[in-house]
Image (spheres, coloured by chain):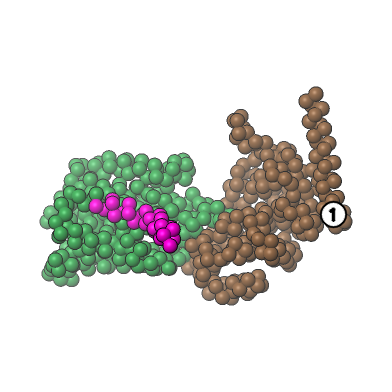
Amino acid sequence: MLELAIPTLSQGLLWSILAIGVYITFRVLDIADLTVEGSFPLGAATAAKLLTEGYDPITSVFVACLAGMAAGIVTGILTTKLKIPALLAGILTMIALYSVNLRIMGKANLSLLRMDTIFTLAGFISDDPQNVALFVGIVSTAVLALLCYWFFGTEIGSAIRATGANPRMIRANGINTDNTIILGLLISNGLVSISGALIGQANGFADVGMGVGTIVIGLASVIIGEVLFGTRTFWRCLLSVVLGSIVYRVVIAIVLALGMPPNDLKLFTAILVALALSMPLIQAKFKAMRKAGE
Amino acid sequence: MLDISHISKTFNPGMITEKVALIDVSLHLAPGEFVTVIGGNGAGKSTLMNSIAGTFPVDKGTISIDDEDITDWPEHRRAKYIGRVFQDPMMGTAANMMIEENLEIASRRNRRPNLSWSSKKEDKEKFQSMLASLHLGLEDRLESKVGLLSGGQRQALTLLMATLADPKLLLLDEHTAALDPKTAAQVLKITTSIVAERHLTTLMITHNMRDALACGNRLIMMYGGKILIDVKDREKKKLTVKDLLLMFEKAAGSELGDDSLLLS
């Protein structure tokens, strides 16, 4: 069990970048954005393709981020300028990206075996690949979380936060909410793509199907983090999401070790998120019942 | 200052829910004028206010502020000139953000936001003294989330936000209607003192005739999408609630008479 600690931790960190992306749409903008399911494999596919073409790992991750941002802009334009409901706009981009990802890779699966990735680049840290993965996870998560903290503390960032909280209020204060929504989706999907690019390299392949269920994984991390670690300030929220992602990986590792078939993983995650999302209602019902009992 | 010329607005035209809200309304506001607007439900008060603010486009007519035609401007662009307080205390502030963050957003209403840090040291003292002038004990709570405030506190804060960036025009849409009588009186007092102090051109909808008479230097009454009564200065000062009701009956009565002529 203990020998799984470091890989679980680094998986949690790499996935936490996706969770931060989901947090930005789901909590900050108050939109459930399904683009994630397409922009995650988009990041992995873009990075993998560039790596096989001989580009260096940093460039690959950077371009993957740009690709994710472009996907975010598409969803943003669909939902603001063309007034398509956000949920549907995300689904449309996600489906479109399936074809785009196949085109990028030229096939459904691209192996990165024996190729130089960001993890070989960071190989100077330690001879043990587990430690290298942990190092990459810590550095990338810390840099991106700090960047998010800075950005959402700026004037533009605070306009995006206010857009999710009260669009009428922020419009009355001179902000074009179309622009803030598009910008928020851009940042979110950029992060998700980076996460996809890193996880693709960690796993040694990019696969067109690897995005299935990522939105639920992101939501699970966000909710677990909020419940366990609180939401008092924006910094606290970011930290909670990262820790939530790690806890989620730990929970998965434990249930797998206890003998749950890996095929049931998505079912388990979906039930977990459904329970967590219905918690407020269940709590209220429970309280009402207790009151009635007295 | 504000020039509204022959604007009309019909909601859901051609549908069973069609509602004619404004019929050829014209209104001119001189700088520094404080106008109270009264009228029953469906009189067109809120439609007039929202037309000015740009919540929706008007069907006909033009709206300009200081000779600048803003008829085709989207809502957020008009916000450069217009400060607003809504009826719903939840509407004008972001609940999950701090008082300071809300004030910062309002303080840059007339310019584009940039990538500088939103919370500015030099603003803190200014905000504190402004909050202190409200006498609601908010000056030491800059870092409290707005969602923790009472309705009256939130409305007073919204008022502060609406007037922070020196608007050319202040729109108050029944901003005391959702408050209890004591808090409503308090918020109204803050309103009149801010408007007087800053000489703000103001349009205030109210459902309370007494408030409409006590505040401002001009009063208009709307009915059926038109402005029926428009009284100013000395004439307004003499007015009582009874006069107002009589004037309304007379004006609305003749209106009804016209209709019956058409029908017969």
Left or right, residue B166 beside residue A290: right
Label 1: how many residues lie within 10 Å, few (<14), some (14-19) or many (20+)?
Answer: some
Residue A17 is situated, as x and y percent measured from the top left of the image, at 30, 60
- Disc 1 marks which amino acid? Thr
Residue A137 is situated, as x and y percent measured from the top left of the image, at 25, 65
Image quadrant where residue B235 sits: bottom right
One can see residue B229 in this view: yes
Magenta stretch encompasses residue B75: no
Residue identified by numbered label 1: B240
Q: What residue do we see at 62% from left, 63% from top?
A: B152
Q: Chain A appears in which tint?
A: green
One can see residue B28 in this view: no
Left or right, residue A6 beside residue A269: left
Residue A192 is situated, as x and y percent measured from the top left of the image, at 31, 55
- Classified by dominant secondary structure, the portion drawn in magenta counts as helix
Q: What residue do we see at 80% from left, 34% from top?
A: B256
Q: Which of A36 and B221 is in front in this view?
A: B221
Left or right, residue A200 beside residue A88: left
**Chain ID of residue with mark 1:** B
The brown-tinted chain is B
Image quadrant where residue B19 sits: top right
Magenta span: A268-294
Left or right, residue B31 beside residue A99: right
Q: What residue do we see at 23% from left, 56% from top?
A: A199
Residue A125 lies, with reference to residue B84, above or below; the image says: below
Image quadrant where residue B213 sits: bottom right
Q: Which of A89 and A284 is in front in this view?
A: A284
Magenta stretch encompasses residue A293: yes
Q: Which of A1 and B235 is in front in this view?
A: A1
